[in-house]
């Protein structure tokens, strides 16, 4: 069943809209569970064995697993179905947003949301955002032909269908889980200023304000429609968050402005050059004692060949060109190149707070941190979030 968002910025759905979203969400569940299991069986019984006959060994990397699987009919069926289902996600929500666009534009004015948004008319939106249908979303995140907030609303509604109800009632489970983990693991840490970079619509920004209500919370993205929509969404949820149109590789804040620099499912959207610049910017912006924290999928070095191939699928078939390049990198090395010390690196896996509850998150926070842990097994147990980053000690 597709999730119906609970915040007041959501558009009005007809019964047909709801049924269409439920069907697409159910189809995605079938693909990511049943067809994925069929593909794994095909890998174990056919593809990996064929590769071994040719190479004298089993696939050792995600790229080799991909090479082994490409000719297999199970992979072709899975990929064809998943690509079509992805397009169906957007097709199921775009008519809803178009029909409600006037209502959502009025909400921007009625909430005075633009007071919380600092747009930069001179900012050049990167080509991979403006010129690419990322996630196969028609027009991408920066498109403004329907209304000033339509791209943000399409992303919000589409992610609700896409996530099959696993990301919380307002798509904020990552932010809720991560912020709760940090509060529990580091109870003496009291951030005054928090920055979310690559916030899209701020769905994972707002939980940081809930976790640390005394802190000033800021959110940054390059796409104006998502920022305007996100600010309105935040206003309607009584969350005091400031939104800024900036590029992650050059953030217009003074050095030492923040105690937390956070990102969620953002790094894999960046080129290697921009990603490296972001880590240096995060280091510059953090005060001593501050924390850089990123939620992402785990690196290929901590996954088996098939698991890595499975997660790298989006790079080849979902218009995410930098996805595999990021996952082939070492998170600790990324932090080091940004100016952080290896001794201050951290990584962890935290269970979804919405699915497993606050006690499960607190239990994870009490467990010893092991930066060399194998993450595959724990992630396979269910909906879990992988976090990594570093403290700025000096």
Image: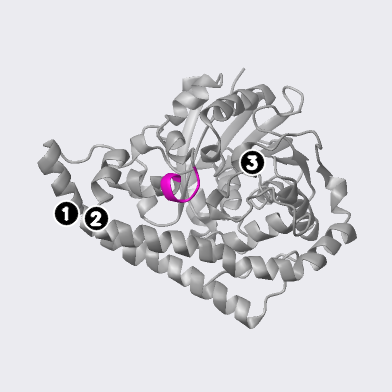
Q: Where is residue 39 in the image (x, y as percent from the top left)?
A: 28, 58
Quadrant holding the C terminus: top right
Residue under numbered circle 2: 72
Which of the 4 quarters of the picture holds residue 57? Answer: top left
Query: Is the residue marked by circle 3 packed among few (<14), some (14-19), or many (20+) residues within 10 Å?
Result: many
Q: Magenta stretch: residue 318 in it?
A: yes
Which of the 4 quarters of the picture holds residue 46? Answer: bottom left
Mark 1 near mark 2, Cβ–Cβ under 8 Å?
yes
Query: Is the residue marked by circle 2 packed among few (<14), some (14-19), or many (20+) residues within 10 Å?
Result: some
Q: Which residue is drawn at 30% across and 56% down?
A: 75
Sequence-wise, the earlier of marks 3 and 2 is: 2
Asked if residue 55 lies left or right of residue 266, the reply is: left
Sequence-wise, the earlier of marks 1 and 2 is: 1
Q: Magenta stretch: residue 63 in it?
A: no
Asked if residue 251 lies left or right of residue 351, the reply is: right
Q: Which residue is drawn at 38% across and 64% down?
A: 31
Q: Where is residue 93 in the image (x, y as percent from the top left)?
A: 62, 67
Residue under numbered circle 1: 46
Badge number at residue 198: 3
Of badges 3 and 2, nearer the viewer stands 2
Q: Nearer the viewer, residue 205 or 151?
A: 151
* SS at mark 1 in the image: helix
Asked if residue 266 lies left or right of residue 327, the reply is: right
Find the magenta span and give its range: 315-320
Q: Which residue is drawn at 54% across and 54% down?
A: 136
* SS at mark 2 in the image: loop
């Amino acid at each position: 069943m597709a999730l119906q968002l609970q915040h007041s910025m959501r558009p009005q759905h007809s019964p047909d809209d709801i049924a269409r979203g439920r069907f697409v969400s159910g189809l995605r569940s079938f693909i990511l569970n049943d067809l994925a299991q069929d593909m794994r069986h095909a890998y174990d019984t056919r593809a990996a064995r064929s590769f071994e006959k040719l190479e004298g060994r089993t696939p050792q990397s995600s790229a080799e697993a991909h090479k082994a699987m490409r000719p297999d009919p199970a992979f072709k069926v899975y990929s064809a179905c998943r690509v079509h289902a992805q397009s169906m996600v957007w097709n199921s929500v775009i008519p809803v947003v178009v029909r409600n666009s006037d209502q959502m534009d009025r909400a921007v004015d009625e909430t005075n949301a633009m007071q919380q948004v600092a747009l930069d008319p001179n900012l050049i939106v990167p080509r991979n955002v403006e010129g690419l249908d990322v996630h196969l979303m028609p027009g991408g995140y920066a498109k403004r032909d329907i209304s000033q907030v339509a791209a943000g609303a399409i992303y919000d509604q589409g992610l609700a269908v896409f996530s099959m109800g696993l990301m919380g009632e307002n798509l904020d489970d990552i932010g809720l889980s991560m912020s709760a983990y940090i509060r529990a693991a580091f109870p003496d840490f009291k951030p005054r200023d928090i920055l979310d970079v690559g916030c899209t619509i701020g769905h994972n920004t707002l939980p940081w304000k809930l976790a640390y209500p005394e802190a000033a919370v800021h959110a940054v993205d390059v796409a104006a429609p998502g920022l305007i929509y996100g600010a309105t969404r935040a206003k309607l949820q009584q969350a005091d968050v400031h939104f800024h149109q900036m590029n992650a590789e050059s953030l217009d804040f003074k050095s030492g402005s923040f105690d937390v620099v956070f990102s969620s499912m953002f790094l894999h959207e960046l080129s290697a050059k921009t990603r490296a610049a972001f880590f240096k910017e995060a280091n510059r912006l953090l005060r001593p004692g501050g924390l850089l924290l990123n939620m992402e999928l785990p690196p290929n070095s901590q996954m088996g060949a098939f698991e890595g191939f499975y997660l790298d699928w989006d790079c080849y078939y979902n218009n995410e060109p930098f996805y595999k390049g990021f996952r082939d990198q070492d998170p600790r090395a990324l932090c080091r190149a940004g100016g952080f010390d290896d001794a201050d690196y951290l990584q962890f896996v935290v269970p979804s707070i919405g699915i497993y509850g606050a006690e499960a998150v607190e239990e994870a926070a009490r467990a010893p941190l092991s930066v060399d842990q194998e993450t595959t097994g724990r992630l396979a147990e269910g909906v879990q979030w992988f976090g990594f980053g570093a403290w700025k000690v000096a």
